[in-house]
Image (cartoon, rainbow, N blue to C red):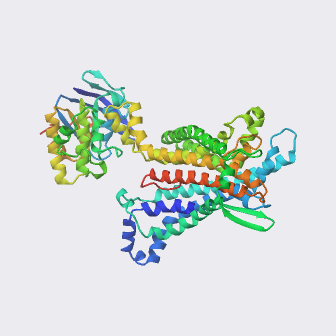
């Protein structure tokens, strides 16, 4: 279980103060808010790419607040797919698990036979699917998704939302999605938190 | 000419073609003249101006050409080299030291100004150019050969002439002068005589110096570039200062660097340094390291920081991120920097000439100079000089051609 307690972060302005959440095994939470409210920064502090001003991040009852990102066991899918251009799709997936079953991982995200494809030949949706397959191969304890559907067209986005949700549920992988799109948040997550309201210590939780 | 091509070609070949397509649809770009005036000229002008600055710097500090071609005429560079043999020796020929000091300061100031203008133009250029996708960049353009063809002919003609001259031997006797096709020039070049070392010695020394320079200058330049990049995020003004400091050897000509190394040698232990085989490497490292920095810095800047972040979230430790992500992404630039370092060290003349003047070590360019210094009426010296030149030319031509294979398709140019 992931527990975030009293997380605070500010750059030139205050982004979030006293933020807290609990993510139970297999649960999917979405965090919404307008651009610039600190959604991405929140995810980056949880996975350890940014340091916190204050607060504690606990994973399975262990304090990981000061643990380096590579040792936390938390996966992150970026807004645009981050695929290493010097490697094929297969090479990218092997970074997640060098002994992993690549064919099954690709089949799971609907990209069977893409092993030898070069990453620059992939469309945006395909790239995000490869990112997801790679992140899942690394067997993260929690998966964070930073607006991964925002750059896709509406039809593709809707389909990918459902596909990714069902893959996460099938793998029993807890996840946090941040997005400015309330519809996507509702379709994807079990519960939704508004980060923009959190700044005023007013948590809005809507169950879907 | 090579510099102008090197600076302008990437701008033309990597520019997003939609810019020209858009210009065609606007009133200002309906004619070729309009498109040239409103699109190509403003985009190319900084590159042409930067190439002009670099051409000025190269020509201003040219030593071998002045020494070999303009008999009796001097430039600041050749004066510094020719009167520099006595520099640094305490209380000896002080007036000559003053000449060198004055010439060095004048040259340094002019070069620094030229470098500053070039750096300013380069910065403006890099900020202005939206680039095409890699697929478009790789599309060949047949019209390009209309420019490249004559350019290649112009650039390669002297090289072919040197190779040709290495086999053309002039015989003079009482009946007159005759020319014959022979390999005697090559044999003379690679045979040790009482007054000259063998071409093999020069080749082994040159390759040894180049290899040692590579081993030191490449990691040194890489570390300097990485340091500038790391400092840039937190303290941009300090990074700018470091950037300028790494460029300073550009503002010193090769002869000036050679003189600097020689003065240091005299101060520390002249006898040891003159007998130490690797001494010229000191000058070669100073000359090549700034080039490594200039190649590695944009390459390091171009790596998306999300690659490292993504690798961290996949659980990769620092050493694995370096070997599996960073090193492969930088492979092309590392190879280009390495090949450039090798080629520059192999062809370096001014600094080596000053540093090795009082020692027995020779390199390919110094051997060419030694052969050319022998009176012209000796039958084999001119073909032998051309033979050594041909060897040097073939090695460097191979290296530069090889380097092009590793250049990223969307490389912005310069080196």
Picture coordinates of residue A149 (x, y %)? 23, 47
**Residue at (64, 44) in percent of width and height:** B200
Picture coordinates of residue A46 (x, y %)? 30, 32
Picture coordinates of residue B23 (x, y %)? 39, 71
Q: Nearer the viewer, residue B400 or B329?
A: B400
Q: Quadrant of the C terminus of chain A?
A: top left
Q: Quadrant of the N terminus of chain A?
A: top left
Residue placed farthest to the bottom in the image? B31
Residue B288 found in image quarter: top right
Residue B61: tell me if it is visible. no
Residue placed farthest to the front in the image? B175
Residue placed farthest to the top in the image? A61
**Residue at (22, 46) in percent of width and height:** A114
Count of numbered circles in the view? 0
**Residue at (73, 35) in percent of width and height:** B275
Picture coordinates of residue A50 (x, y %)? 37, 34
Is residue B40 depicted above or below B319 in this figure? below
In the picture provided, is B334 more to the left or to the right than A208?
A: right
Is residue B155 depicted above or below B199 in this figure? below
In the picture provided, is A80 more to the left or to the right than B393?
A: left
Residue B64 found in image quarter: bottom right
């Amino acid at each position: 279980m992931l527990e975030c307690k009293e997380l605070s972060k500010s750059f030139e302005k205050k982004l979030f103060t006293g933020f807290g959440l609990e993510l139970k095994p297999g649960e999917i939470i979405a965090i919404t808010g307008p651009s610039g409210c600190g959604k991405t920064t929140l995810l980056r502090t949880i996975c350890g790419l940014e340091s916190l001003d204050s607060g504690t991040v606990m994973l399975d009852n262990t304090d990981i607040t000061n643990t380096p990102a590579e040792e936390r066991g938390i996966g992150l899918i970026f807004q645009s797919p981050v695929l290493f251009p010097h490697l094929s799709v297969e090479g990218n997936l092997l970074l997640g698990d060098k002994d992993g079953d690549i064919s099954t991982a690709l089949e799971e995200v609907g990209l069977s036979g893409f092993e030898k494809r070069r990453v620059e030949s992939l469309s945006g949706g395909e790239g995000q699917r490869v990112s997801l397959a790679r992140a899942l191969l690394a067997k993260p304890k929690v998966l964070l998704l930073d607006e991964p559907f925002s750059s896709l067209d509406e039809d593709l986005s809707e389909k990918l939302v459902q596909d990714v949700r069902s893959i996460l549920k099938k793998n029993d992988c807890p996840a946090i999605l941040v997005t400015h799109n309330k519809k996507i948040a509702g379709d994807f997550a079990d519960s939704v938190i508004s980060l923009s309201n959190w700044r005023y210590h007013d948590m809005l939780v809507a169950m879907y | 000419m090579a510099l102008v091509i090197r600076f302008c070609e990437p701008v033309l070949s990597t520019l997003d073609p939609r810019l020209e397509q858009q210009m065609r649809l606007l009133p200002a770009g309906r004619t070729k003249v309009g498109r040239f005036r409103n699109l190509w000229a403003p985009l190319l002008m900084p590159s042409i101006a930067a190439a002009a600055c670099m051409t000025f710097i190269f020509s201003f500090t040219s030593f071998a050409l002045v020494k070999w071609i303009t008999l009796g005429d001097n430039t600041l560079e050749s004066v510094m080299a020719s009167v520099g043999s006595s520099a640094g020796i305490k209380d000896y020929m002080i007036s000559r030291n003053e000449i060198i000091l004055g010439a060095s300061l004048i040259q340094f100031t002019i070069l620094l100004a030229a470098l500053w203008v070039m750096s300013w133009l380069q910065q403006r250029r890099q900020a202005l150019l939206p680039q095409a996708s890699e697929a478009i960049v790789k599309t060949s353009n047949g019209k390009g050969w209309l420019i490249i063809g004559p350019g290649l002919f112009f650039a390669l003609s002297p090289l072919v002439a040197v190779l040709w001259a290495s086999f053309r031997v002039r015989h003079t006797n009482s009946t007159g002068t005759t020319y014959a096709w022979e390999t005697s020039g090559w044999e003379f070049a690679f045979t040790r005589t009482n007054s000259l070392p063998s071409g093999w010695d020069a080749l082994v020394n040159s390759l040894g110096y180049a290899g040692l320079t590579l081993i030191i200058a490449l990691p040194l330049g890489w570390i300097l570039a990485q340091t500038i990049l790391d400092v840039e995020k937190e303290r941009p003004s300090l990074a700018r200062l470091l950037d300028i400091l790494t460029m300073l050897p550009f503002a010193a000509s090769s002869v000036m660097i050679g003189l600097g190394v020689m003065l240091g040698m005299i101060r520390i232990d002249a006898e040891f340094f003159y007998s130490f085989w690797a001494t010229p490497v000191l000058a070669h490292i100073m000359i090549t390291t700034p080039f490594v920095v200039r190649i590695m810095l944009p390459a390091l800047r171009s790596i998306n920081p999300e690659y490292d972040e993504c690798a961290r979230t996949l659980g990769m430790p620092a050493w694995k991120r370096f070997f599996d992500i960073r090193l492969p992404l930088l492979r092309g630039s590392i190879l280009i920097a390495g090949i450039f370092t090798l080629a520059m060290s192999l062809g370096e003349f001014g600094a080596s000439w000053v540093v090795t003047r009082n020692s027995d070590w020779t390199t390919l360019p110094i051997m060419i100079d030694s052969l050319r210094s022998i009176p012209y009426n000796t039958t084999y010296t001119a073909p032998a000089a051309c033979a050594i030149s041909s060897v040097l030319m073939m090695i460097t031509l191979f290296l530069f051609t090889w380097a092009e294979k590793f250049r990223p398709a969307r490389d912005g140019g310069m080196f």
